[in-house]
């Protein structure tokens, strides 16, 4: 599938902002199953400094510094990208889940690259309740592909999607208690379940192209930023990407932007401002449209 992705973030303030410094993770990654044909990030008002750099995990981050006084700041990213369903080696999926623990078996090929994702991180606490929940899926010797898929399905079944149940600061224990949340929560929960058993798993941010109901047209801006996770397949450089919010392996509707230990590593936009403003508003609009439809319009 070929897509045109538009991601616009608008900050509005009730007084002048003298300086805005920010980082944005809005550039999709180049991957074996994902090709980025073009990409641009525009800042309004124009940035006095704007550059891209590759972070610790290979993501492209955009740094910007706006020095012109402003009451509205817009970060607009536009990407032309094509996506195929990732392919996984059958022998890697069939390996026992116990082999996906790089800290337990550091001599396993690829373990050193996965080790960082087997440890706790600020937004992924390895709580006992998560370990207990995961144990039902991680039966001794069970193939990693089967075990992870079962965990994904159970989270989809046992937890309700409810945008009012949590906030961006909610924790894994909060989600376990409320049995509800959004994609970010379900990704953090699944990662906590796996890391509590020392399995390497990373948080992935991106976009999901939505499909309108039969007979209905697409509504521009109806798509949103999305989150899922990927799990290290032992002895390889492959990671099985799963989406517990939708109970599926990622395929050609998922556009991968960035990955890290948790949400904090790949926040779409974050930064610091210098102002006397007392109030602010944030608006985010995302659209993922088939490229052919975009060109035809």
Image: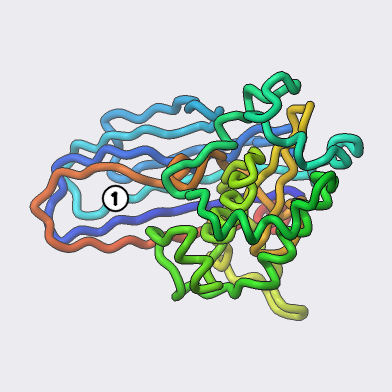
Residue 74 at least partly seen? yes
Q: Nearer the viewer, residue 51 or 87?
A: 87
Instruction: Name the quadrant of the C terminus.
Output: bottom right
Q: Secondary structure at mark 1?
A: strand
Q: Nearer the viewer, residue 200 or 129?
A: 129
Residue 287 at least partly seen? no
Residue 80: which quarter of the image? Answer: top right
Residue on which disc 1 sits: 73
Q: Is residue 227 left or right of residue 137?
A: left
Q: Nearer the viewer, residue 188 or 147?
A: 147
Question: Residue 196's spot in the image, x, y percent?
Answer: 59, 47
Is residue 189 shown above or below 120? below
Question: Residue 76's spot in the image, x, y percent?
Answer: 43, 48
Question: Residue 129's spot in the image, x, y percent?
Answer: 55, 60
Residue 198: which quarter of the image? Answer: top right
Q: For the view shown, which residue lies furthest in the bottom direction?
A: 215
Badge 1 crowding class, 10 Å Cα cut-off, few under 14, some 14 to 19, many 20 or more, is some
Question: Residue 121's spot in the image, x, y percent?
Answer: 46, 41
Is residue 84 shown above or below 8? above
The residue sitting at 67% across, 42% down in the picture is: 81
The residue sitting at 51% across, 53% down in the picture is: 127
Q: For the view shown, which residue lies furthest in the right direction?
A: 90
The residue sitting at 71% across, 59% down in the picture is: 152
The residue sitting at 70% across, 33% down in the picture is: 31
Q: How many marks?
A: 1
Q: For the view shown, which residue lies furthest in the left direction?
A: 276
């Amino acid at each position: 599938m070929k897509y045109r992705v538009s991601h616009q973030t608008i900050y509005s303030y009730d007084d002048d902002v003298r300086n805005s410094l920010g980082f944005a993770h809005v550039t999709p990654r180049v991957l074996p199953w994902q090709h980025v044909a073009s990409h641009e990030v525009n800042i309004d008002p124009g940035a006095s400094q704007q550059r891209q750099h590759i972070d610790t995990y290979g993501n492209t981050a955009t740094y910007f510094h706006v020095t012109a006084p402003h009451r509205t700041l817009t970060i607009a990213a536009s990407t032309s990208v094509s996506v195929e369903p990732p392919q996984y080696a059958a022998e890697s999926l069939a390996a026992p889940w116990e082999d996906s623990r790089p800290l337990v078996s550091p001599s396993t090929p690829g373990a050193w690259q996965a080790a960082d994702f087997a440890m706790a991180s600020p937004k992924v606490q390895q709580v006992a309740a998560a370990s207990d929940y995961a144990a039902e899926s991680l039966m001794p010797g069970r193939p990693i592909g089967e075990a992870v898929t079962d965990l994904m399905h159970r989270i989809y079944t046992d937890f309700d999607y409810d945008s009012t149940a949590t906030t961006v600061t909610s924790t894994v224990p909060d989600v376990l208690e409320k049995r509800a949340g959004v994609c970010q929560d379900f990704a953090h929960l699944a990662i906590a379940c796996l890391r509590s058993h020392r399995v390497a798993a990373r948080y992935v941010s991106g976009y999901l192209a939505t499909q309108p109901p039969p007979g209905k047209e697409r509504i521009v801006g109806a798509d949103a930023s999305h989150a899922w996770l990927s799990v290290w397949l032992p002895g390889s450089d492959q990671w099985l990407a799963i989406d517990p919010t939708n109970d599926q392996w990622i395929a050609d509707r998922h556009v991968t932007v960035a990955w890290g230990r948790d949400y904090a590593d790949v926040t779409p936009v974050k930064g610091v401002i210098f102002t006397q403003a007392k109030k602010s508003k944030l608006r985010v609009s995302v659209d993922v449209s088939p490229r052919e439809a975009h060109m035809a319009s």
